[in-house]
Amino acid sequence: MPTLFSLKSRATHPGKKGIQVSGLLINDISMRFDLPNGGHVQALKNVTLDIKSGELMSVLGPSGCGKTTLLNIVAGFLAPTEGTIELSGDVVTGPSPQRGMVFQQGALFEWMNVRDNVSFGPDMKGVSRAESKENVEHLLEVVGLQDFKEKAIYELSGGMQQRVALARCLANDPDVILMDEPLGALDALTREKMQSLVLDLWKDTGKTIILITHSVEEALLLGERLLVMAPRPGRVHKEYRLPFAELGVGADLREVKKHKDYNSTREEILEMIWNMEEEIMGRTEESA
Amino acid sequence: MTALLVLALYIGAFFGSFYIAKALYKSAFEKKGFNKLKTVTFGDESAITANRVASVISVIAVFWMWVAFTNSSIPLPKFPGPYSGDMTFTYTAELEDGTKDDATVSMRVYREDIQQTLDAEGNPGREPAPAEIEPGDGFAKNDSLTVARYSFKVVNVWQNDDVSKKDGSKIVAINGNPIAPGQEISVPEGTIGLTDKGTPTFEPAVGLRMARLYLPAPEVVLQRFIWLNKEGYQGYTLLEHTWFSLKRVVLGFFIGAIVGIPIGYAMGLTGWARGWFDPIVEFMRPIPPLALIPLIIIWFGIGEVGKVVLLFLAALWIMIIAARSGVSGVAIAKVHAAYSLGASKWQILSKVIVPNSLPDIFTGARVAMGVCWGTVVAAELVAANVGLGKMIVTASKFQLTDIIIVGIIVIGVIGFAIEVGMRALENWLIPWKGKV
Ligand SMILES: Nc1ncnc2c1ncn2[C@@H]1O[C@H](COP(=O)(O)OP(=O)(O)OP(=O)(O)O)[C@@H](O)[C@H]1O
Ligand SMILES: [Mg+2]
C-alpha cells in the first residue's frame, strides 16, 4: 500500500491571534429537540470533550443516545441549544471543508464517476483539474481504486463505495474527519480490510478522526480513545484510552485481538451497553 | 351480436394461439438468463418478461380481425360477405277480377363504394346500368333495377306494368310463395318483402363484413395514407397536419418545462415559494386541460397561441410537481456531504439538487409529453385550422372513415414514438436511474 507522506499532516494549526491552538473542543453541549406534540427530547446533556489534534476517537452507545446528533453538531449541521464547538480556537457556526464527513452509505453522487466524486471538494474550491489531478490520482491509489477512476458509482461494491467516500473526504484535506457508522453496511471481511485502511490513513495523515460505530470490536480497534455514551439524556458515560489502534497500524488486526486486555475490555463494554439497553427496556415497560 | 362474436373470437385467439405457440415455439416459453434457475416465478413479477411471440401474434390477430370484417382484397380468411352480382325474383300480380300474371325482377347488386374505387387507369368506378331485359308477356312486365350493397330498394314493379297499383294490381306472391303486405321472405341473395302498403322491397344480404363507411379495409386505409401524403386534406398534407400538431406539443411542453422546473425547484428550496405556489398548483392540477379549452378559445381564439397556451398549462403543473419531488428526493446525506466538502448554496443546487432530480424530472417530462399529445388532438377536435385532430373531425363530418383511421393510427404511432424516444433519452442521460 502506498504511504500518504505526500499528504500534508497538520498536527498543529495557527489559531486566532497567532497563538498555537490545536484540536477540537466540545464545550458543554446540550441539545433539546422540541417535538410537534409539545414534548421534547433531550438528545444530549452537558457533553464536554477535548479532542487533541490527530486523535482517533470511537464512539459507542445504545441506539438513540445522541451519537449522530453529536456528530451533526460538530459537523455544523445542527446548532446546539447550549454550549459551543471550537476547532483550532474558531467557533463552529456551520458546515465547512475543515470538517469532512463520511456517511454510512448513499452520500456519493451517482451522476459522477469515481474520479469526479473524489475531486468534488477541490472543484468546489475552484482548484483547477490540472492542479488537483495528482492528489486525486494519489488518493485513488491509496484506497486501491486507481483502476476504477472512470467507473460509475453504481458499478462499485459497497466496500469500494466507502473507499470512494473516504478518498473524497481526504481530497479536501480536512482537519477533522467525522464518520457516522461508515462501515456499518459492509460484510465482515470487507469491514476488516476497511478498518485497516482507516487506521493507516489515520497514522499517515495525522487527521483527527471521530468514528461512530455500533460494533464494540470496531470501537476497540479504531479508538485510541473510546467514548461510551448513555441515553436519556445523551451523555458521556465512560471513556477509555486504548493501545489497540496504535498496535493495529500496519499490522494484522486479528493479532491485535489476541492482546491480553482486548477481550476483557470488550466484555466490560458489552456488559455496560447491555445494562443500558436493559434499563431502557425496563423504563419503557414501566411507562407503558 | 357482432361485438359478442368479436369478443369470443379474440378470447379464443388468446388461448388458442397460446397452445399452438407453445407447441411450435418451445424456446419462446423458456425462462431466460438468471430466471432460468428460478423454480417458482408465479407471483415474482421481476421474472416476467413479455413473450414476443405473443406480441407478434397479438398484432397479427388484430390485423386479421380487421381484414376479416371488411371487404378487403387481402387474401386472408374472412367472414361471409355481402351479396353482389345479378339476381332475379318473380312476383305474381293479381287484379281485382282475379287474373294473375307473373313477371321477373332483375336486380343488379353493386359495390357500395364503387365511386371510391379506382380502375387501372385511375378513374373512379361508376354505378352500373341495370341489366338489359325483355318486357315479357301479360299485364305484369319484367323489371330491371340496381341496388348498392348494404342498402335497400323499394321496387315499384308497376311502373311499366299495364295495370298500376292504383288500378287494383296487387302483389300476392314472390317466387311463387304467397305473401301479404308487411311480410318478407328470405332468398340466398337477400330478403324480399312487401311494405305495409304492398310494394315489394329488396335488401341484399350483408353477411358479417362491414361496409366501407363503417370500417374500411386495411388496403383502403393504406391508399388513403398515401393519398393524404400526396394530395393532402383540407389544404394540408398528412405530414403538415402531423407537423403542426407536434410543433404545438413541443412548444407548449418546452415552455411548460422551462417555467415549471424552476418553480418546482423554488418550491422545494424556499418556504416562501412553496407557500406562494402551493394554492395555485393544488387548485390547477386536478383541472383537466380539456376543461380549459372553452376559456382558451374565448381568450386566444382558435389560432396557434391558444393551442400553445393550453399545452403549456397541461405541462406546467406536471413539471412543477416533478421538479419539486425531485428536490425532496435528494438524500440529506448527499446535501450534507456536499456542504462539508465546501459547496456553496449555488453549487449545492447545480451540482447536487439538479442532477439528483433528473430522474424525477424525466418521469414528469414523459407524463407531460403524453398528456400534451392527447390534449393537442382533443383541442384540435374542438377548434383548429390544421392539425391531426382537425383532419379527423373534418373527415368525420364527411364520413371519410378511412381518413379518421389514418389519423388515429398516426396519433397512436407518434404517441408511442414519443414514449420510446423519451425512454431512450432517459437511459442515455440518467444511466444511474433505479440503480441506487
Ligand atoms: N430532528 C429530530 N427531531 C426530534 N428528535 C430527534 C431528532 N433527531 C434526533 N432526535 C432524537 O434524539 C435522540 C438521539 O438521536 P440520534 O440519532 O443522535 O441517536 P443515535 O445515537 O445516533 O442512534 P443510532 O445509534 O440509532 O443511530 C433520539 O431519541 C432521537 O429520537
Ligand atoms: Mg445514528
Image (spheres, rainbow, N blue to C red):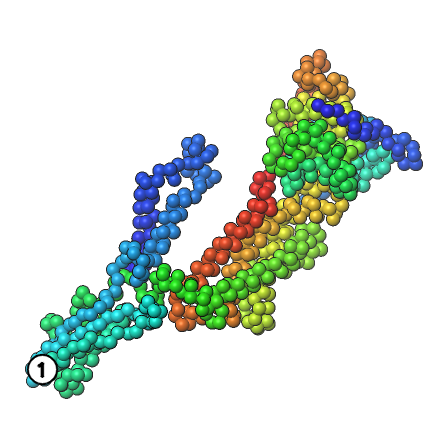
User: Which quarter shows the N terminus of chain B?
Assistant: bottom left
The CB of the residue at mark 1 lies under 8 Å from ligand 1: no
Q: Where is residue B161 drawn, in percent x and y? A: 15, 83
Instruction: Using a 10 Å C-alpha cutoff, classify the residue at mark 1 as few (fewer than 14 neighbours), some (14 to 19) or many (20 or more).
Output: few
Q: How many marks?
A: 1
Is residue B173 placed above or below B169 in the rendered structure?
above
**Picture residue at 13% right of the left edge, 85% below the top:** B162
Name the kind of residue labelled 1 in the image: Gly
Q: Farthest residue in the front direction? A: B121
**In terms of depth relative to the viewer, which is nearer, B27 or A177?**
B27
Q: Where is residue B102 drawn, in percent x and y? A: 10, 77
**Picture residue at 39% right of the left edge, 63% below the top:** B223
**In terms of depth relative to the viewer, which is nearer, B194 or B328?**
B194
Using the image, name the chain to which the residue with label 1 belongs.
B
Residue A15 falls in image quadrant: top right
Left/right of residue B200 with respect to residue A97 in the rendered view: left
Q: Farthest residue in the bottom direction? A: B167
- One can see residue A100 in this view: no
**Picture residue at 56% right of the left edge, 66% below the top:** B307
**Picture residue at 66% right of the left edge, 17% below the top:** A254
Q: Where is residue A1 drawn, in percent x and y? A: 71, 23
Secondary structure beneath dot 1 equals: loop
User: Which quarter shows the C terminus of chain B?
Assistant: top right
Left/right of residue B162 with respect to residue B405 in the rendered view: left
**In terms of depth relative to the viewer, which is nearer, B432 or B375?**
B432
- One can see residue A4 in this view: yes
Q: Read off the residue under disc 1.
A: B138
Q: Where is residue B46 drawn, in percent x and y? A: 47, 39
Is residue B357 placed above or below B307 in the rendered structure?
above
Q: Farthest residue in the left direction? A: B98
**In terms of depth relative to the viewer, which is nearer, B56 or B46?**
B56
